[in-house]
Image (cartoon, helix red, strand yellow):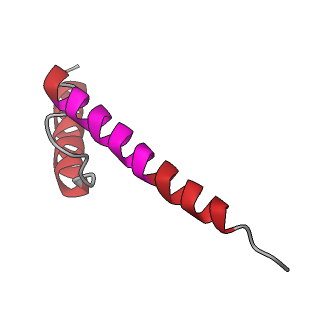
Amino acid sequence: MGQRRDLTADYAQMNTQIALIAEDGIKLLIEKGWMEQPPSATDYESLERIRSMIIVLYEKERTLL
């Protein structure tokens, strides 16, 4: 039941390299303006207010016809 200790070292080194590549990718996204702020949760309250305003406007238009 011998585990290969060299694989553990290889995986650790690979994880370090992946982290460095990911960091470079994030820096590139910020530099190009493709990601100015980290993704955030959806603001459902704001979406509901907008939806309500659209419904009100639609109902007003329907009564005018």
Name the image quarter holding the N terminus.
bottom right
Question: Depth check: 51 or 27 in front?
Answer: 27
The verdict on residue 28 being magenta is yes
What residue is rendered at 21% in x and 36% in y?
A: 54
Question: Depth check: 33 or 60 in front?
Answer: 33
What residue is rendered at 23% in x and 19% in y?
A: 65
Indicate whether 28 appears above or below 11. Answer: above
Rendering quarter of residue 32? top left
Q: Position of residue 51 (x, y in %)?
A: 24, 43
- Left or right relative to 2: residue 64: left
Q: Position of residue 15 (x, y in %)?
A: 47, 53
Q: Residue furthest right?
A: 1
Question: Depth check: 60 or 28 in front?
Answer: 28
Rendering quarter of residue 21? top left
Q: Position of residue 55 (x, y in %)?
A: 24, 39
Q: What span is colored magenta in the figure?
A: 16-30
What residue is rendered at 25% in x and 46% in y?
A: 39
- Left or right relative to 21: residue 59: left
What residue is rendered at 17% in x and 31% in y?
A: 30
Q: Is most of the magenta stretch helix, strand or loop?
A: helix
Q: Residue furthest bottom?
A: 1
The verdict on residue 2 being magenta is no
Q: How many marks?
A: 0
